[in-house]
Amino acid sequence: MSRLIVKGLPKYYTEDKLKEFFSKQGDVTDVKLMKKRNGESRRFAFIGYKAIEDAEKAARFFNKSFIDTSRIDVELAKTFSDPNVPLSFREKRRQDEERLKMQEERLLEQENRAQVKRQKIKGVSEIDEEISNNPKLREFMEVMKPSHQVKSWANDSTADGSGGPSAKDLEDALNHQTDVKSTISEHDVLQVEDNASDDEYTDFNAIKNNIEDYDEEEEQMINLADLNKESEEEEVEGVKEDDNSLAANEEVSDLDWLKSRRIRIKENEEESTNTDVQEQAKEAVAQSKQKSLPVAEKSPEEQTVEKLQETGRLFIRNILYNSVEKDFRDLFEPYGTLEEVHIAIDTRTGKSKGFVYVQFANPEDAVRAYKSLDKQIFQGRLLHILAGDKKKDHRLSEFDLKNLPLKKQRDLKKKAQAAKTQFSWNSLYMNNDAVLESVASKLGLSKAQLIDPESSSSAVKQALAEAHVIGDVRKYFEDRGIDLTTFDRKERDDKVILVKNFPFGTTIEELGNLFSEYGQIKRMLMPPAGTIAIVEFRDAPSARAAFTKLAYRRFKTSIIYLEKGPKDLFLREPIPEENVNVPEIEQSTAVEVKATAHEIMGEEPSNSGDVIEGPTVAIFVKNLNFSTTVETLSDLFKPLPGFVMATVKTKSDPKKPGNTLSMGFGFVEFKTKEFANAAISNLDGHVLEGHKLQLKLSHKQGGSSTGSAVKKSNKSSKLIIKNLPFEATRKDLLELFGAFGQLKSVRVPKKFDSSARGFAFVEFNLMKEAENAMNQLEGVHLLGRRLVMQYAEQDSEDAEAEIEKMTKKVRKQVATQNLAAARLAGKGKIELEEKADEFESF
C-alpha cells in the first residue's frame, strides 16, 4: 500500500507541516489530518505517497521517531475491505439499526398474517349465520353439493332447516358451479321434478350439466351480497319465465308446459365467463399479497452494479492531479478491454479536474473492476468509483444512415473509424502533387516543365523529386529535436497529430487557425517544403477532439489525412519559435550528394595522434551550428576526463567541388561509459555558438571509430526492391538508382510470359552507395507504389566457393535428370513386356 497512518501526532500540527515533514522520503500525494467536530485534532493522520516503495521506505524511516516531543507510530494503512480492520462506531450503529429494522419487519409480517386469518374466520362465521337464517339459501346449498357429498338416501326436496349446509358447503357449491347466471332458480327445479313425467322428449341436460359439472380442486371466498345479486339476476337465453297462470291453464298440456320451460346454454360463453371471473379473483388476491409484503429497497452498491451493467463506464474521483491516462490504463486493463480513458481537463489552465472516466468494452468487466478497486489505495489516495452515465453519442442511427447516399455513408464510416484505424501508409506520406509543386517552386519552374508528359522517365523524375523533399523534411525534423526512429513504433501519442495531404502553399498560420479551435496548441512544425506538418496539443482530450472533427475533412482543394504521432517523438521541449513557421534553412541536396573518401571507406578523420586501443563510447551531438568546426567541439569537451576525440560530420559541397559542408551533428568519444554519462549530464543543453546542444549516447556503442574496419553485419552492396510496379522497366531502375552511385548490375526477374514478378535486384559497386540509396529512397513511390527495400544476400567473392556452389547445382540437376530417365525406362520396359505377352497369346 502507498498510504500510511501516523499516530501520536502533536495537537498543534497542521497538514502543511505534515506534508513538509514526510516529503523527505518521497513524493507526497495526499495528507489527511483527522479532526473532531469542533476542529480539534484527533492526533492521527493519513499520508499518501505516489509510489509503494516510497511509502514502505517512509514507514521504516519514521516509525518510532519523534515530532518535536511526541513519539509517532507509522504503519501502512489498510483498506476498507481488509478483514482485520476493526469496525468504527458509526458502522456498528448502522449494523444495529439494520438488525432492529429486520426484526420489526418480521414482527409486522407475523401480525399481518394473524389479522388475515382472523378476518377469514370471521367471514366464515357470518356465512354460517346467513345460511341458518335463510331457508331458501340453505336449500340451494344442499342441492348444489357435489355428488360425493350427498347421501343417496336423503330426501332432495326437503325444505326444513334440519341438516342445513354450512359455510364450507356454500364455498364448494359456488366454486364448482359452471355459471350461476345461466341456471334457473331452485324453486323451478323442484317444480319440474314434481310435475314432470317420463316423457322421452323431456330435456334435463342443461340442469344436469349445471349441477354435476364441477371442478372440485378450486376453492374461493365470495360475499353473500354478490351471491344474492347473482341469484336475482338470472338470465336464460331465448326463454322468458312465465308466471303460475301458465301452469293453471288446463288447455296447455304437460309436454307443452315442459317444453316452454326448457333452456339453451352456450358452453363457450359459460367457460369464458367463468374463466374471466376466476382470473379477476386471482389478480385481486395477488395484488392484496403484494400490498401486504414490504418492498425491499436496493442498496447503493446494487444500484451502482445495475447501472454499470447498462453503461460499462466507470467514474473515478479523488485521483492525483498530475496523473496521466497511462496510469489508469495500466490499472484497469487487467480487468478487460478498454475503449477509452478520459481525464477531465480544465480548458483554461490545462490541469486535471481530479476525476477520470474509464469505458470498458464489456460491462461485466466494469463490474469486476468496480468490486475490486473501489475504496482501494492508488498513488496514495483512496479511489472512489461510481457508475458513470452513458457517453453521449451524436452519430446517426442505422436507419438514418441508410437514407443517405452511398458515398456519404462511406465518408461518415471512414471518419468514425479514423481514430481507431492504424494507417497502412508510411508516416512521412506526402501528396505527390504537393511534392512536384514544391520542387518546381524551388527550381523556379512550372510543374509542366518539371514533368514532361512526352518523356518516358516522368515516373522516375517524380520519385527523385519525392526523395529530395523527404530528405529535406527529415533534415528539418532532426534539427528540431524529432527522433525519426520512433515512426516505426506501434505505440501512439494522443497529443501529437501528423497532418498530411494538404495542398501546396498552405501556411502554418492557416493550419494553426484550423486546429486551435479545439484546444491550445503546444507546438506546430511544418517544413519549408510545405507537404507535411506536426501538431502537438497541450492535453490529450483537445487532440482527440481535433482528430475526430478534422479527419478526412476537405481543406481547400484536397482532403486532410490525419495520423496520431508515435510515442516519445520529441527529444526536447518546444521553443517559442516553433509556434510559427521558421525561415527556410539551407536546403539539403541529398539526391546529388557524393560521399567523401572517408565515408566510403567507413573511416573518421582523426585530429589526434594518439590511438586508443580497445572499444570506446561515443556521444551523439545534435543541433550544432553549421560553422562549428572540429577544433571548437574538441575544445569544449577536452577538459572532461576520459575524452578521446571529437568529430563533426560533413558532406561535399556540390556548388564548390573540393569543399565540405557541416551536416549539423557530430560525435565525441570517451574511454568508458561512465565518462560519457558524466559529459552528458554536464554539457547537455549547453549553448555553443548560439545553438543549444543535444547529447545522447550513440547507438553504435562498443566499437572504436578510429578503426578502419566497417561493421558490415547484414549490410551489402546488393539491394532487393519489393512492391515494384509491374509496369516498371529495367531502364526506370537504372535511372532511379543511378543517381546515388555507380551500378554494377540491375536484374528484373520475369515470369514465363515475360511479365515482371514485382521485385528486382540492384547491385552497387560500393556498400556505402547502397546504404545511401536505402536512406534516400525510403518511403518513395514509383508509379503509385511505395518501394520496399532490403539488403540482399551478397554473392560469393571467393572463386573456389563459387565453383563449389556451381558444382553442387550441376550435381543436383544431373541427379534429377537420371531419376526422370530411370522412371521413363521402367515404364517403357513394362509396356514392352505387356506387348510380348499379347503376341505369345496369339
Image (cartoon, grey):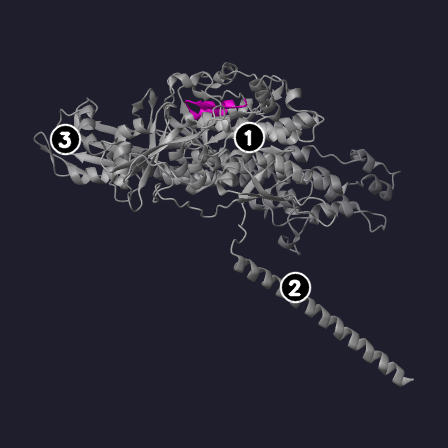
Percent across and percent down for residue 746 are 61, 43
**Tag 3 secondary structure:** loop
Task: Assign the C terminus to one quadrant of the image.
Answer: bottom right
Residue position marked by numbered label 1 in the rendering:
467
- The amino acid marked with disc number 1 is Ala
Q: Which residue is mark 2?
A: 813
Task: Name the residue nearer the viewer: 783 or 202.
Answer: 783
Please give the residue where the numbered disc 3 appears in the rendered image.
9
331 relative to 417 in the view: left or right:
left
Cα–Cα gap, marks 2 and 3: 92 Å
Identify the amino acid type marked 2. Gln
- Residue 120 numbered mark, or none: none
Query: Sequence order check: which comes first, mark 1 or mark 3?
Result: 3
Q: Quote the CA–CA distance across marks 1 and 2.
A: 44 Å
Question: Amino acid under label 3?
Answer: Leu
Instruction: Select label 2 or label 3 by which is in front.
Output: 2
Q: Residue lying farthest front?
A: 658
- Asked where in the image residue 210 lies, by quadrant, the reply is top right
Q: Which residues are magenta?
A: 531-546
